[in-house]
Amino acid sequence: MATNLTHAHGQLFRRNPDEVFPSLQALWAHCDGEKARSRDVWRPPSALNPVANGSLRLDVGENEGDEHGLALNDWSFSQLCALAGVSKDTVNRLSPETAGRVLRETLPAGNKPLQLYAEGDRIRSIHGTAYTRLHNADLVTMLREFAVDFEPPPRGITGGTGLYCGEQDLFCFLIDPTGWAEIGGEAFAPGFFAWNSEVGKRSVGVATFWFQAVCQNHIVWDATEVVEFARKHTGKVGEALSDIRRIIERLVETRDARRDGFVSVMRTAMETTLGNDAEEVLKALARNGIPKGLAKEAIARAESRGRFTIFALVDALTRMSGELVNAGERADADQRASSLLALAAASSS
């Protein structure tokens, strides 16, 4: 059963321009740079010292005597407040000095280390020992190697490309615009979503599918054969890359098999005629359920192309369908054209 997918639609309207990337290569370069610049800092909660230095910062004792501390972004600040058990909204209303005092008094004691992920002088995330990181760059590296011939969809109405990476997470929307194949008598192309967060905002995962159209709002219309996989960032999360790779490889293998079959059907349709003259073709169309009036018009259009091939007749019927106003009549005409194309499929198998 076909469904409409809105994953990429939501991403299109929430991403800032600096989170949008024109290609998988550009996205990889960004993620790889972040990975190279970032580091893990392990500290017990008792070693964390919120300080005020124009804004609230966190002294993690990296450099002895350094009271400036590391900056917090929105995500790491939220995690720090959760760790202290205080409301982020409440702390946000306080002065940096008061906020620092509140957090110093509420942060847990103990020596069980916390994992702070820092880039330069900014803390990107704060986690306990159960969290295991999977870098965005590693996921994109795998996509570049195994997502053969896939590319971003046409730009959305906001300028979004389907390739995004921000402070909290990464999202990729890729399709193969040349991978059209026939499923149940209709044309579909393959695509997938892939996502990750190296700061723990969301799981790592993939959703593959076959679709009929993508609009400028990046809604995927009439998707079928949707396969989704997701994994939390715990334990051996690195194994998720192998799982995602296998899922994408299966999509590629299915695409190649279906595309080869589709090409074979089209070739047969272009080479096979239904008769040598209009009268013979009219009888053949009648045997396949094409009404006489519709058949005559299709024959007249096909005749202008020189031969009464199945492809020419199907193309004529499809174009005539597009000229119909009533949706029910269009669907009926499309079904008849598909049944005619099935003759070529039977001949090519």
Image (cartoon, rainbow, N blue to C red):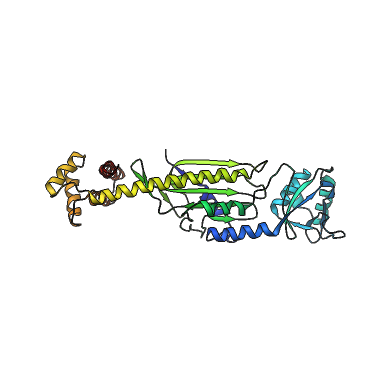
Residue 86 visible in the displayed image:
no
The one nearer the camera, 92 or 302, is 302
The one nearer the camera, 88 or 116, is 116
Vertical arrangement, residue 128 with respect to residue 60, above or below: above
The one nearer the camera, 254 or 160, is 254
On the image, the x and y values in percent for residue 40 come to 74, 52
Residue 194 visible in the displayed image:
yes
The one nearer the camera, 323 or 8, is 8
Total number of numbered discs in the rendering? 0
Please name the residue shown 61% across and 60% down the image. Answer: 30
Please name the residue shown 73% across and 47% down the image. Answer: 79
Instruction: Give the left or right position of residue 231, taking residue 296 as reference.
Output: right
- Quadrant in the picture for the C terminus: top left
Q: Residue furthest right?
A: 65
On the image, the x and y values in percent for residue 341 come to 27, 45
Instruction: Give the left or right position of residue 222, taking residue 73 as reference.
Output: left
Please name the residue shown 64% across and 60% down the image. Answer: 33
Q: Residue furthest top?
A: 1
Instruction: Give the left or right position of residue 341, taking residue 141 as reference.
Output: left
On the image, the x and y values in percent for residue 123 come to 73, 55
On the image, the x and y values in percent for residue 181 come to 37, 47
Instruction: Give the left or right position of residue 181, taking residue 294 as reference.
Output: right
- Quadrant in the picture for the N terminus: top left
